[in-house]
Amino acid sequence: MMEKELICVNCPMSCRLTVQIEENKVVSVSGNSCPRGKAYAETECIRPERILTTTVRITGGIHRVLPVISESEIPLDRIMDAMELIRSAQVKAPVQVGDVIMENILGTGVNIVAARSMDKFSCSDTSQK
Ligand code: SF4
């Protein structure tokens, strides 16, 4: 049996969790003040997940990169592959916040969406008065 200590990050209470793991299964969680802590411990110990935030190259926009975010958590062990895929992509302005930039990334069922809107670049953007 293995024991792991975690801090639950689901709310500001930051409960200290103690997790007992046996044969890659969580057999007990203590220290949690609500069921979300137990669910967090189970996911974090067996298959951790993270929200992915990064940028993608954009053409024709007022900036050269567009901030993007995953619509929900993706497995932590897929993050680097997902980053690689996003790094190789390029989108075209204009983009609205929430637009799907990459659908079902790496077959995870999670979309990568624009974290902000970005207008097309126009010549008046560089005019100096
Ligand atoms: S276990 Fe519940 S109360 Fe404690 S930090 Fe997690 S979400 Fe908050």
Image (spheres, rainbow, N blue to C red):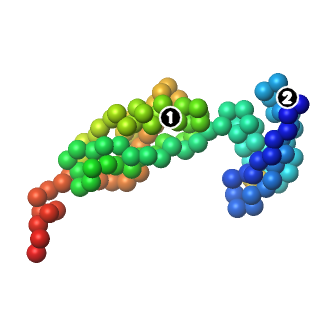
Q: Is residue 104 above or below residue 30?
A: above
Where disc 2 sits, the SS reads strand
Cα distance in 3D space between marks 2 and 1: 28 Å
* Left or right of residue 66: residue 79: right
Mark 1 close to ligand 1, CB under 8 Å: no
Q: Amino acid at mark 1?
A: Met
Q: List the single residue furthest toward the bottom.
A: 129
Residue 94 shows in this picture: no
- Which numbered disc, 2 or 1, marks the residue that appears first in the sequence? 2
Residue 6, position in %: x, y? 77, 47
Q: Residue 57 location in percent, x, y?
A: 31, 43
- Residue 117 placement: quadrant: bottom left
Q: Residue at x 81, y 53 (%)?
A: 16
Q: Which amino acid type is marked by label 2?
A: Glu
- Quarter in which the N terminus is drawn: top right
Which dot marks residue 63?
A: none
Q: Position of residue 108 (x, y in %)?
A: 53, 29
Q: Quadrant of ligand 1?
A: bottom right
User: Circle 2 sits on which residue?
Assistant: 22
Measuring from the top left, give residue 82's x and y in whole percent.
47, 33
Element type at mark 1? helix
According to the picture, the residue beneath numbered tag 1 turns out to be: 80
Q: Is residue 95 above or below residue 44?
A: below
Q: Quadrant of the C terminus?
A: bottom left
In this picture, residue 76 sits left or right of residue 105 = right
Task: Say which residue appears at 55% left-offset and 44% top-offset.
Answer: 51
